[in-house]
Amino acid sequence: MQTFTGAATAPPPTCNLYCHPSARKNPIHLHLVTDAVARNILETLFRTWMVPAVVIRFYDAEELKPLISWIPNKHYSGLYGLMKLVLPSILPLSLAQVIVLDTDVTFSSDIAELWALFAQFSDKQVVGLVENQSEWYLGNLWRNHRPWPAVGRGFNTGVILLWLDRLRQTDWELLWKLIAKRELLTLTATSLADQDVFNAVIKEHPELVHPLPCVWNVQLSDHTLAERCYLGAADLKVIHWNSPKKLRVKNKHAEFFRTLHLTFLGYDGKLLRRELLGCPSQLPPGAEQLQQALAQLDEDEPCFEFRQQQLSVYRVHIAFLPHQPPPPRPHDVTLVAQLSMDRLQMLEALCRHWPGPMSLALYLTDAEAQQFLHFVETSPVLSARKDVAYHIVYREGLLYPVNQLRNVALAQALTPYVFLSDIDFLPAYSLYDYLRASIEQLELGSQRKAALVVPAFETLHYRFSFPSSKAELLALLDAGSLFTFRYHEWPQGHAPTDYARWREAKAPYHVQWAADYEPYVVVPRDCPRYDPRFVGFGWNKVAHIIELDAQEYELLVLPEAYSIHLPHAPSLDISRFRSSPTYRDCLQTLKEEFHQDLSRRYGAAALKYLTALQQSQSGA
């Protein structure tokens, strides 16, 4: 089975392809026309979701644009809306038939049933389409409305059965171009993109079209007459959100269709990974090795849960919401952090404190991802920010994959530098501008490898007046309203920052690495990644700072920088760490294995880290 899905600049949240198990007896082959941004999103999605019996092939939309850019077009999809016209020319000659889908359709049936309709084509029919479910092509929607020619109401091209072999035999490319050029002499532009051209061709050659049952393209446009179809139908097959408003379209039954669509999005996506009984299929890349590694784990080992979590392949959807990359600037900084559903309330405050770009990884279930989407859309603060990139990592297992989340967010940062923070910290209001100025003044770059330390503080008050300057912060510190971060619980984590020196400092100063040091730092985007073996609570940032030190990053404390941790309920993982000796023993095992790997990578230079660890443990 071959199917085609065309994507515009990014896959919108209204794009879904659902296949009933019977359709998976044959592999689904998706041919995706995308730009570079969408390809990165989709490649990550399909690679990490590891859905069996799905094959993907990409086509560069930039290469197709010259083929159709000569056509004036008023449709909101721009040139992307015209690309279906050239599919017979660019798809492999080995493909005889394809299903063409817009990305704003929701399947509620088995796509194999749609494929089976090819068998009903006559010898001359080359394209299967559903009648247009509005009166657009009748030309009576408003005064002076001049649509392109069509047979009756015409046909909608959101769902197409294309018989490619026959189209090529009809010299499709010459046919549609001749008719389009002729119509453009009087109509000046297309209003509905490829659909206008398809209908103009069908007007002159009605024998080419095979009308499909209306349930295969229930159209929810602003002027829809789809009610005539679905009120008398036993079941609906494909719902088409063919309005610029998409899910926000208003008509009599829109709420029913929205609920159906959102219910689908809330399903557990892990179900798609399951091999179907009686349907042998080729496993996605890496799946067989993963299964073998999981089979070798001993379920009776005390640290089995940690081992299993380390082998997890998390489903990832990068750039989950529309995102505008920041313009290139040589000293720009992206704030990188991760969070789960219980920290969503931090996002608005963070946006107020940090005006620069952010890359945030969220650890959510499929249902929580939809709740998050609603949260952002209804927040004036969050919906106004287009330079915040949200990346969903779907929940898998019981332990929080903190470093895996950090790596996802770090990999998607687009500025030369990143501020590696945590979601429950609020940076100084001036920190974004101060960091950029500091990077420029310190002449960081290929000639100087440094990690800029942002001193961390904390308050125990839920109601807290955030200091607007270092002087105000010091006053709060002296008054006991602020503390250096984790001073009471984990002083070694930030003691090397030397807060006494910071109080008086006017210029950046060097500090030395020490055991258990875990400051928040600003580093180049290509810095070492976090070690993903550290899941749950404990040592996740410590290991990363060790790696930076091993690669000879200078540690420079910035005298005017600060970030403040706000109080919150303890996470499940920290509660387990405090209450479970087994949990703490497993963390110790991970530390030892980490040091063994350090020795293999850095040789004798890594000995100091093991020595420091042993000394800190003996002194504990």
Image (cartoon, grey):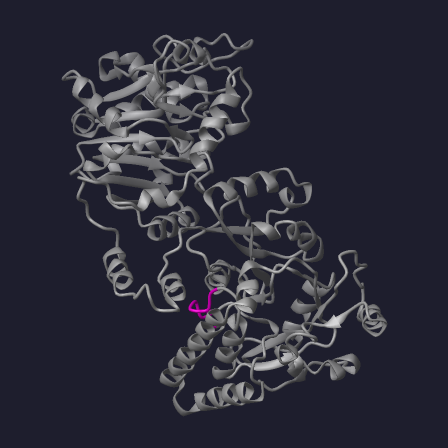
Relative to 598, residue 299 above or below: above
Residue 569 in the image: state x and y as whole percent: 65, 57
In the rendered image, the quadrant that contains the N terminus is top left
Q: Position of residue 492 (x, y in %)?
A: 63, 81
Nearer to me, 325 or 545: 545
Residue 285 sits above or below residue 14 on the image: below
* Image quarter hosting the C terminus: bottom right
Residue 245 seen from this side: no
When the figure is inspected, residue 431 is found, relative to residue 200, above or below; the finding is below
Farthest residue, direction left? 123
Say how many tags the image has.
0
**Residue appearing at x 61%, y 53% in the figure:** 343
| Residue 529 highlighted magenta (yes or no) | yes
Q: Is residue 56 above or below residue 180?
A: below
Q: Nearer the viewer, residue 294 or 143?
A: 294
456 left or right of 217?
Answer: right
Left or right side of 299 for 322: right
Foreground: 376 or 435? 376
Work out whether residue 234 can be spotted. Answer: yes
Magenta-tinted stretch: 528-535
Please name the residue shown 64% across and 51% down the image.
Answer: 347
Measuring from the top left, give residue 495's x and y in whole percent: 66, 81
Front position in the image: 138 or 358 = 358
Q: Main secondary structure of the magenta part?
A: loop
Q: Position of residue 17 (x, y in %)?
A: 35, 34
- Please tell me in which quadrant of the rendered image residue 531 appears: bottom left
Residue appearing at x 40%, y 63% in the figure: 305
Instruction: Locate residue 74 relative to residue 443 in the image: left or right.
Output: left
Assess whether residue 561 is covered by the magenta stretch.
no
The residue that appears at 60% across and 47% down in the rendered structure is 386
